[in-house]
Image (cartoon, rainbow, N blue to C red):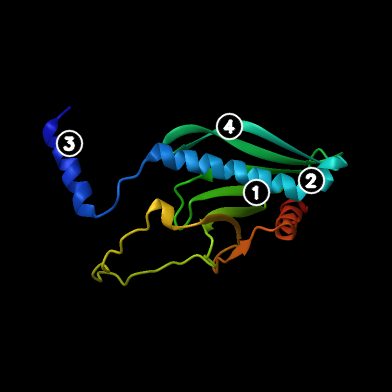
Amino acid sequence: MYKKFDDFLERQRAQSGLPTMDLEERKSQWLASLRDLYQLIRSFLQPYLNDQRLYFCQFHSEITEEQMGKYGVETGNIVLQGDSNGQAHLHPVGTFIIGARGRVDLTGPTGKTVKLLLVEKKAKSARTRINEPFSSYPERQKPKTEGEAEWVWKIATPPPEVEYIELSEDNFLNALMYVLER
């Protein structure tokens, strides 16, 4: 290794004031959150799964994120019994999402999509801030450490006024009807 470059990288990291991130731990937490999401969705669908009006299938897939490269994830399909076009797909997008810890897109046969976001439990909406051109940068706030926030899955409403809705059985079934509607 090139010692000067190692020293340079360490100085840059120290000057940024940002904590280092354990990417393997982040990926592990993300994959556990996906398993929890699919378990929650199965619980919402259980009556329909029991009488075989719906099927829920999981498949191994791969996604690529700039920070972590290519890695394996589970995707989900919700299939309406007797309707070859009645499928909704749960597609994990990734864990490096602005304002969230992860995103899964619920997409229907006509392309309608509902975004499921892993956000802080207390979050009610997406916060965006636009600085005036050429303004000085605001004072940098120290980011929260991994253990300070409680992360939960919520449904994001479409832009421009993105709000987060509790991922309850009723809200999920409404989202599923929306993406499956033709």
Amino acid type assigned to the residue bearing label 3 in the image:
Asp
Q: Earlier along the polypeptide chain: callout 3 or callout 4? A: 3
Residue, disc 4: 61
Distance CA(mark 1)–CA(mark 3): 42 Å
Location of residue 140 with respect to 182 vertically, above or below: below
Which numbered disc, 3 or 2, marks the residue that appears first in the sequence? 3
> Where is residue 75 drawn, in percent x and y?
62, 38
The residue indicated by pointer 2 is 46
Point out the frontmost of discs 3 and 2.
Answer: 2
Element carrying mark 4 = strand
What separation in Å lies between label 3 and label 2 (alpha carbons)? 53 Å
Earlier-in-chain disc, 4 versus 1: 4
Neighbour class for label 3 at 10 Å: few (<14), some, many (≥20)? few
**Which of the 4 image quadrants contains residue 157?**
bottom right
The image position of residue 86, as x and y in percent, is 79, 43
The label nearer to you, 1 versus 3, is 3
Which residue is under mark 3?
A: 6
**Residue in the image at 52% along x and 65% along y:** 123
Q: Residue furthest top?
A: 1
Give the spatial CA distance, label 3 vs label 4: 35 Å
